[in-house]
Image: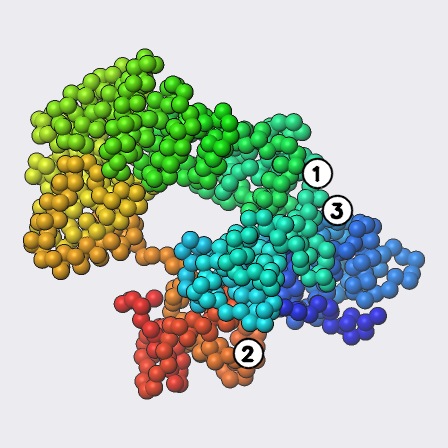
Amino acid sequence: MAGSKRDAGWIPAEVTTFVGRQREMSQARTLLTRSRLLTLTGAGGIGKTRLALRVARDVRRSFPDGAWVVDLGPVEDEALVAQTVLAALGLDHKSALPVITVLVDHLADKQLLLVLDNCEHLLNASAVLVRTLLAAAPGLKVLVTSRQSLGIDAEALLTVPPLSTPNPDRPPPPKAMLRYAAVQLFVERASAVLGEFTLSEDDRRAVAGICHRLDGLPLAIELAAARLRVLCPQQLFTVLGDRLALLNQGSRAAPARQQTLRAAIDCSFDLCTPQEQWGWARLSVFCGGFDLEAAEAVCAGEELAREQVLGVISELLDKSVLTMEIQPGLGRYRMLETIREYGRDLLRLGGEEAVVQRRHRDHYREFAARAEADWFSARQETWSTRLYLERANIRAALEFCLNTPHEVDAGLVLATSLWGNALGAGNLDEERRWFGQALARDTEPTPARARALRVDGWLALLLGDASTAQARLDACQDLAKRLGDAESLAHAVQFAGLIALFREDFPAAVRLLEEAFDRHRATTDLWAEWMALFFLALAYCLTGDPRASAMAEQCLALCDAHDARWSRSYALWLLGLQHWLCGDTQRAIPLLQEGLRIVRSGRNLLGVAQCLEALAWATAQDGRGEQAAAFLGAAQTAWLSVGIALPSLGRLLHYHSECEARLRGSLGDTAYTAAVKRGTKLTLDQATDYALGEPPTPPTPLRPEHPPTALTRRQRQVIELLAQGMTDKQIAAKLVLSPRTVEGHVYRLLAVLGFDSRTQIATWVVENFAPRQGEHDESDPLCVGEGNGYEVKRVRSTTC
């Protein structure tokens, strides 16, 4: 059947261009040097087969007896696996010996790479065959593609990830977009469909959205590009909501499982047990990931007991339905959106959607209540991180409450439990939208409504919406009196005191806040007591009351007693503010810096804004005008990240205006404006570093403009020739090297630059280096070339 074929091996020729995957190819080659069995796993349509074929093509020279690819996709009977491998090797089974014996005899003395493609539906037979062959043939190595690992000894695993995609909300310019493998694939396949397709500024956002919505899944992107025959990119992005129905026309020559997106996922579903299928459907209710605790709360029910959930998750991970990511001290699981959409269809068809959504809502309502009850503790930053990770699930739970009859009250409870974290994390406008909708739809006189009125009014106050704040106060006071609930009454009195404080009605503010403090001390809510203490101390500070310092110290001591670091940053700000108001900047500035140092480690954007603002006032008073103006600019960015234009409390806004006037007078308008502008351009991390006198944190680019380390002389030569479009063989001849050595240089350059293709290297050189005549600076590690030379297009003052 194949005299020459048997000698050379057999790998199907590529009929379309191979895009990206340089990092995975490098990892696969490395793993193949360390292990005799490597399994590429990943979801259906992720590109396991293409990657395996490219790796086999690259390494086949290392195997004297070649690399052989066996496609097990069409095989349905496990008894035929060995026979299929035998036939793919070009051997006839004419003897009476068992097939496995013939295979072992043939491979025993061979140095050969065997690629078994699409093993997931024949897992047991494939595992037995591979284990037998590896034991009998010491020169054999096996590369497997499967949605699930074989699960045998010495198996190395490489999970194939989705292709890289740009941020759909802030896509880079068209040229930079092509650095993302998903975009590059889309553009190349679109060009094949249309004859020519150039990514334009008009298409940029739509293409970024398409690649992101399709999870960087190669099969989905190829199917989407085929739709450009009838839809422009903007239309395609708009209709991708039902991607499983839309992406239903692939190549007629492709295997059935690759002709539509649904068919690819159907194959994965068919590999699951009934319990795993139920788990898949129920887990699809999660948005943006979930942990084991959440999975157990939501999935347990008929057909699936709580103690079985962990096992189901393990199996779904192994079958590439789920992926796992490790957060500090916490493992989280995630579905690709396409796989999740498939699961939601299952959930609807099974008639379980509302039941599972309610379990999901109940879990996150209880989760948020625990976070609120435990907020004033050493776990503030832990809760902040966990709430941040769960923000997509919390939004989904709130949406369910608002759009489902008789569920709005539960939404009010959930939303009010989050308000303390929301103050620091920003998104105040989003919080107010939730409250606005929920309060309008549920007018029942409940404690939950009283709390929601107070919280929404407080947020309105921060955002400068005084009329809404007053309306919420009136409604809150009326409802608290009707309920006769001590907690509701205490909060209503405190809310009234805050409005008076914002209006600079200080006598009323002090009187009401003192009453609120007394009321809260009579309850068991420690955080509410601390909040009342904080606002009362702030009122004393702003009115010059001699009790202010002692009250601020008490506020700080309470934080220290309970190790509440998030709250401690506010207490330090308050104490720093008090010292500044007393003219003692030498004590104020270190306190404000300490508060800033605390909030930088968490997501307390409000704390960052307050500390930077007060530092600007204190620094201006110290005579460091340009630094103070930069702090004002950085504070402006922080305020906007919270959703507030400027400090909203009247007296604090007055201090801001005084500081601005002082700095304009000392620096002049031009210098002041320039310094503020410099501050606004700092990231919050950079602004914090600047305020603390620490080395600046460099921004993390999506792709490096320049290599992170200096290129060697040989790498400079190779990269110059690459930019000229030379092949590895041509470069090898030019530099008198072996093609294999040049190949190694190219792969290392791709890894250093973070690129996926040789074309991207050439583009990078063109964009970042300008050809010039004459001399070039060979001492510059970024200077490329030995002859006609290139000059770095400098984008910053320091070299890499």
Percent x, y of residue 765: 42, 74
Is residue 284 in view from this perspective? yes
Q: How has the structure been colored for display?
A: rainbow
Question: What residue does disc 3 label?
Answer: 124
Tell me the amino acid under the disc marked 2: Thr
Q: Which residue is mark 2?
A: 727
Query: How many residues crowd around disc 2 within 10 Å: few (fewer than 14), some, or many (20 or more)?
Result: some
Discs 3/1, front: 1
Q: Position of residue 93 (x, y in %)?
A: 88, 61
Alpha-carbon span between mark 1 and mark 2: 49 Å
Check if mark 3's residue and mark 2's residue have beta carbons within 8 Å. no
Residue 682 quadrant: bottom left
Q: Quadrant of the N terminus?
A: bottom right
Which is more N-terminal, label 1 or label 3? 3
In-image side of 505 versus 172 (left or right): left
Of the residues shown, which amino acid type is indicated by label 3? Asn
Q: Secondary structure at mark 2?
A: loop
**In which quarter of the view is residue 763 placed?**
bottom left
Dot 1 or dot 2, earlier in sequence? 1
Q: Could you tell me which residue is drawn at 48 percent across and 80 percent down?
A: 724
Q: Amino acid at mark 1?
A: Thr
Please give the name of the residue rendered at 68% of the width and 51% of the height, measured from the top-left corner.
263
Q: Which residue is at 63% across, 50% downward?
A: 245
For the residue pair 599 and 520, the one nearer the viewer reads as 520
Q: Which structural element holds mark 1? A: loop
Q: Nearer the viewer, residue 106 or 548?
A: 548
In space, the residues marked 3 and 2 are separated at their CA atoms by 43 Å
Residue farthest to the bottom, as pictured = 774
